[in-house]
Image (cartoon, coloured by chain):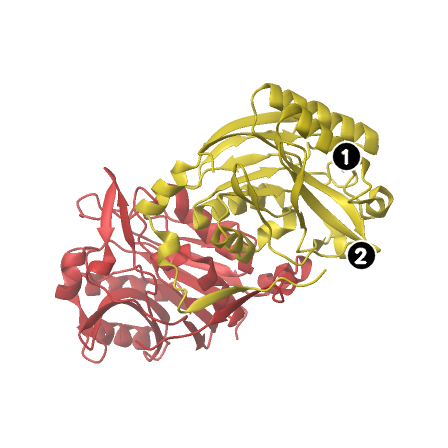
Chain colours: A yellow, B red
Amino acid sequence: MVLEIKLALLQMKVVDDKSANIEQAKRMISAASRKGADLVILPEMFNCPYETAKFSQYAELKDDSLTLKSLASICRNNKVHCVAGSIPEISKGKIYNTSFFFDDKGKILGFHRKMHLFDIDVPGEIYFKESDVLSAGNKVTVIDTDLGKIGIAICYDLRFPELARLMTLKGACLLVYPGAFNLTTGPVHWKTLLRTRAIDNQVFVAAASPARDHEASYVAYGHSLVSNPWGDVIVEAGVKEEILYVDLNLEDEEKIRTELPLLKNRRNDIYCLIDKPQKE
Amino acid sequence: MVLEIKLALLQMKVVDDKSANIEQAKRMISAASRKGADLVILPEMFNCPYETAKFSQYAELKDDSLTLKSLASICRNNKVHCVAGSIPEISKGKIYNTSFFFDDKGKILGFHRKMHLFDIDVPGEIYFKESDVLSAGNKVTVIDTDLGKIGIAICYDLRFPELARLMTLKGACLLVYPGAFNLTTGPVHWKTLLRTRAIDNQVFVAAASPARDHEASYVAYGHSLVSNPWGDVIVEAGVKEEILYVDLNLEDEEKIRTELPLLKNRRNDIYCLIDKPQKE
């Protein structure tokens, strides 16, 4: 495990054109790599508008995916690791919201399929039902990389503290959440939840959102950010397309865990969190 | 269960004189009752300075406690329910940090013994080690009252999302945290954690701190507050002694749980949180 990681959050603007999205992702990854990023993070559904009707239309098979091939090549050429936000993935007739992890040789080391599907109905404000078209992943994801163990979860997954805790207990030193909160939940919940997952688990937490686009049917909140293990937001985007850079020093986690031994103080004798991955 | 509760948070200033603290608690409870409070909440260690050396000196047996007798009488006379912050309780030679719940007839309906003991050592900022002198409680506490089911946990217990979740799963419609964060952790963590427990569990969360006293050896943060289930802070104190009033409408929880069905969307098939109370 390295102790210092230069992270780049790619808050890209997603359009209704897969090729254009892929090209823009490639441009942003190259730019971040030129600035020395070790790990780049794309937002949720970076190659597809966040609309249930589009997911099946944009969905790709893992082994025959223009998006994934393009990313493999750009990661290899730029020697950069990548949490590839998420894309609609089709597998055995089911569509998932899936985040792939590429190492700096362009190899897929693992992937996370969104475990919690986002269904919301706040009258007069927002209606969205992922479960109409998507299937849920069935496992907690922590990927063993050259940079350390990285936990990946997607957007609505953030709302479930059990998942952040399990990723931490599996050794993740960085939790990454590609996510697209909206203008109803974003202002109240996004930063608060991300900071709390960092504070509770004494880990770095990074979240990448698409840029805000008021023309889109679902308007993402933006505000990609990184919280350190103490809960300080050490970098935060606005609402427009941009790349954010931040250096993480993983020794900070050890220091905080010594000063305030939260994970050691858990009462695992009283409450016990069990992890039971299911078949997909 | 009633649907509307008038709550009073008693952010009292604690001094190094048990009788004086009891008298002040009684005055504040009476005052809150005159304003129509159904439930009053005292802060952590409201009858004793927050110093490990004082805990044994101030500790009382449940069945022979001046503090508890005084509170029983004031609750009965004023027909008000009370989460009695916490006091050092001695039982079978062990000292606990315990919160008692009184109904409006002055009867103790239950109690919570702090489950997680607070040990912190941030060099140059703060050192405190509860585990030097206190024993930990061994159960999750939800008390069935005329006002509904109320979960109680104390201060450092707040840092463990498992506990808030278990109180919620046991039916608590209000989580109460008497707590004394300090000037290192308070500004960064207090409000964020309280709001997140409310957001994650879609419950009201109320927290009562002692008033800030720069003469004390441990300086409490103050900022007693209530968050609604959406995570909005609906009332928040400053740092001085004061009483805060707020009306809770428990129907808000049902509404939010319908709009955004978080608790229904938990993946209990993947992660399973088990509750195993232990003997004390």
Is residue B94 visible in this depiction of the protein? yes
Decide which of A93, B45 is in the foreground and name it. Answer: A93
The kind of residue on which mark 2 rests is: Asp
Between marks 1 and 2, how big is the CA–CA gap? 28 Å
The kind of residue on which mark 1 rests is: Lys
Query: Are the residues under marks 1 and 2 on the same chain?
Result: yes
Which residue is farthest top?
A34
**Quadrant location of residue A93?**
bottom right
Residue A48: image location, x then y, percent:
79, 38
Residue A172: image location, x then y, percent:
50, 47
Give the chain letter at badge 2.
Answer: A
Q: Nearer the viewer, mark 1 or mark 2?
A: 1
**Residue sitting at 52 percent across and 73 percent down?**
B2
**Residue sitting at 64 percent across and 65 percent down?**
B264
**Residue sitting at 79 percent across and 40 percent down?**
A217
In the drawing, what numbered circle is on residue B14? Answer: none
- Local packing at callout 2 (Cα closer than 10 Å; few below 14, some 14-19, many 20+) is few
Is residue B239 visible in this depiction of the protein? no
* Residue A120 sits above or below residue B273 on the image: above
**Quadrant location of residue A215?**
top right
Describe the element under mark 1 as helix, strand or loop: helix
Q: Which residue is mark 2?
A: A132
Instruction: Determine whether, in the image, residue A64 is placed left or right of residue A11.
Output: right
Decide which of A60, B220 is in the foreground and name it. Answer: A60
Describe the element under mark 2 as helix, strand or loop: helix
* Residue B165 sits above or below residue B238 on the image: below
Decide which of B21, B91 is in the foreground and name it. Answer: B91
The image quadrant where one finds the C terminus of chain B is bottom left
In the drawing, what numbered circle is on residue A69? Answer: 1
Q: Earlier in the sequence, mark 1 or mark 2?
A: 1
